Amino acid sequence: MADKKQDHWANVEEVGVYWLMRFMFGLYTIGGRFIFLIILYPVVSYYFLSNKQARSASMDFLQQVETYSSGKAIKATWLQSYRHFLQFAESMVDKLSAWNNKLNIEDVVIHGREGIVEQLERQEGGMILGSHLGNVEVCRALATINKHAKLNILVHTKHAENFNRLLKDVSNNETVELIQVTDVGPSLAITLDEKISRGEFIFIVGDRIPVNNGRTLKATFLGKQADFAQGPFILAALMKCPVYTLFCIKEKGVHQLYFEHFSDRIKLPRKSREAALSEYIQQFANRLEKYSLIAPLQWFNFYHYWQCTAEKEPS
C-alpha cells in the first residue's frame, strides 16, 4: 500500500514554475492551441515515463473502471494510460481558454440549464458540488447565462499555486472569484453565507479528502470503498441553501456541462448526523461514478484514490 503521507493528493507536487507557465501561455496566445499542444505533448510524454507514482495511479484507476464495468467503459492498457495523461494536457489548454475568455458559448452545452436559470432569476444563491472529473474551469460558463450570476470557487492551491496564479493573471472576468481555503473556519463560513444571501453560488469539489486530516466517511465508488470528505456537506448544511452537482466532460470537442439538483437543503439531525452524512456522501459518489464511467480518461486525480486515506479527528 502506498505511504499515506506521500500519497495524499495535497502532497503531489506541481511540475513547472510560474514563469515557465507564463512563457507557455504566451506561446499559446501567439501560436494558438495547435502549436501549444505540439510543444506540450513531449512534456507530457516525459512526465508519463518519469513519474512512476502518477502512472501507477492512472493504471490503478483505469483497472478499477475496467473491472467494475466488465471492460465496457475502457480497457486498462499502457496506451490508455498515456492517453489519460494527454487528456490532462488538453484540459490545461481548455483551462487557459476558459479563463482567457476564449471559450465560446457554442463550445459548451449546459444540461439542466432551466434549473440554474430559475434559481438565478429569483436571485437566490446556493452551493454546487463538483469534482476533478473533466474540466471544472468550464463551470465559468454558468456565469454567461444570467447577468446576476456570480460564482465563488473554493480551491486548495498549495499544490498548484503557480497555475492558479497564472489563471488569475490572465482572467479579466469579475463574475468568478477564486477563494483559497485549507480549513473552513467561522469567518469563512460567515463570508460564504453573505455571498449566498446576495444570490451568489459557492463551488466546492467533493471528490478529495481533507488537507489537514479532516473528517471523512466511506462510500462505495466503482465497486470499492473510498474516503470522501464530510466538509463540503457539513458546509452545505450550515449554509441552509439549495445544493446542486456539476460535472463537465468533453465529448467530440464539446464540453457537456451537467447541472443537477442534489437537495433543497442538506439536513443533519443531531441524533443521526453520521448516518445522514453517509447517505448524502453516497449519493454524491453515485453521481461521480455515473459520469466517471462515461469519460474515465478525464479523471484528473493522479494519486491512488482508494488507498489515499485521511487520519480521523478524535470524536
Image: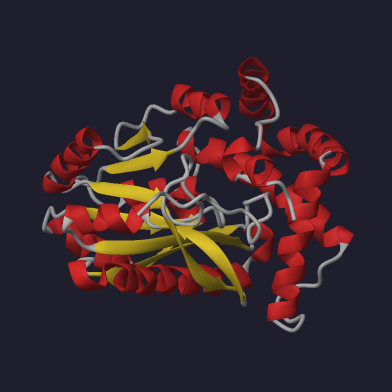
> Image quadrant for the N terminus?
bottom right
Residue nearer the viewer, 66 or 237: 237
The answer to which of 174 and 184 lies nearer the viewer is 184
Tell me how the rendering is colored.
secondary structure
Give the residue furthest to the bottom: 70
Which residue is depicted at the point 25% across and 43% down?
150
Above-or-below relation of 183 to 78? above
Q: Look at 70% across and 76% down and name the residue there.
A: 73
Percent coordinates x, y for residue 250 in the rendering: 58, 59
> Can I make out residue 82 in this image?
yes
Vertical arrangement, residue 101 with respect to residue 133, above or below = above
Q: Is residue 181 left or right of residue 242?
A: right
Quadrant location, the C terminus? bottom left
Total count of labels: 0
Q: Nearer the viewer, residue 3 or 47?
A: 3
Horizontal side of residue 91 vs 107, given as left or right: right
Q: Quadrant of residue 128?
A: bottom left
Residue 114, percent from left and from top: 27, 68
Instruction: Kindly identify the residue that appears in the image at 32 percent across and 59 percent down.
Output: 233
Q: What residue is shown at x 73% (from left), y 51% (from top)?
A: 2
Residue 204: percent from the left, percent from the top?
Answer: 38, 49
Measured as percent of width and height from the top left, residue 145 is found at: 29, 53
Residue 267 in view in this figure: no
> Residue reaching furthest top?
19
Residue 44 lies in quadrant: top right
Q: Is residue 36 left or right of residue 145?
A: right
Left or right of 213, for residue 250: right
Q: Nearer the viewer, residue 174 or 232?
A: 232
